[in-house]
Amino acid sequence: QVQLVESGGGLVQAGGSLRLSCAASGLTLNNYVISWYRQAPGKQRGLVAEITSGGTTNYAVAVKGRFTISRDNAKNTVYLQTNALKPEDTAVYYCNAFLVTAPKYNYWGQGTQVTVSS
């Protein structure tokens, strides 16, 4: 059974940092494009950052320079280091694993809440 389990969310003051983790079981993360998405109340889920199996990264404009995505293949875990957090970063953060080749599996975690107070 495939599982993606996010952790590391919480309440932090503006300017603070959190490290989110996405631990996988039942699949090898290195074979997938791993992305972090976030969804704030009343808003659509949007891409925050992604990392390919080759290590190429991509960031949303709103987080570029503040967030860093990385992967530890030995631990089958992907991280999202979030720095200089702003109240507008408040959202539920979700981990996604997408297999770009057939059969193009697509998996989601349950999400972890990040709340940034002003």
Image (spheres, rainbow, N blue to C red):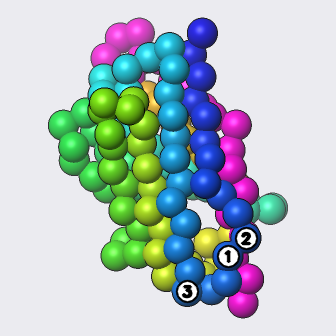
Would residue 45 be visible to someone looking at this image? no
Say which residue appears at 31% left-offset and 30% top-offset: 74
Dots 3, 1 in contact, CB < 8 A: no
Counting from the top left corner in percent of width and height, residue 22 is at 52, 40
Dots 3, 2 in contact, CB < 8 A: no
Dots 2, 1 in contact, CB < 8 A: yes
Q: Which residues are magenta?
A: 99-118
Tell me the residue that label 2 is attached to. Answer: 11
Say which residue appears at 72% left-offset and 90% top-offset: 118
Tell me the residue that label 3 is attached to. Answer: 15
**Label 3: element kind:** loop
Q: Tell me if residue 111 is in the magenta stretch.
A: yes
Three-letter residue code for mark 3: Gly
Three-letter residue code for mark 2: Leu
Counting from the top left corner in percent of width and height, residue 54 is at 18, 37
Say above or below: 21 vs 108. Answer: below
Q: CA distance from mark 3 to mark 1?
A: 8 Å
| Quarter of image, res 89 | bottom right
Three-letter residue code for mark 1: Val
**Label 1: element kind:** strand
Counting from the top left corner in percent of width and height, residue 51 is at 32, 45
Q: Is residue 80 left or right of residue 110?
A: left
Q: CA distance from mark 2 to mark 1?
A: 4 Å
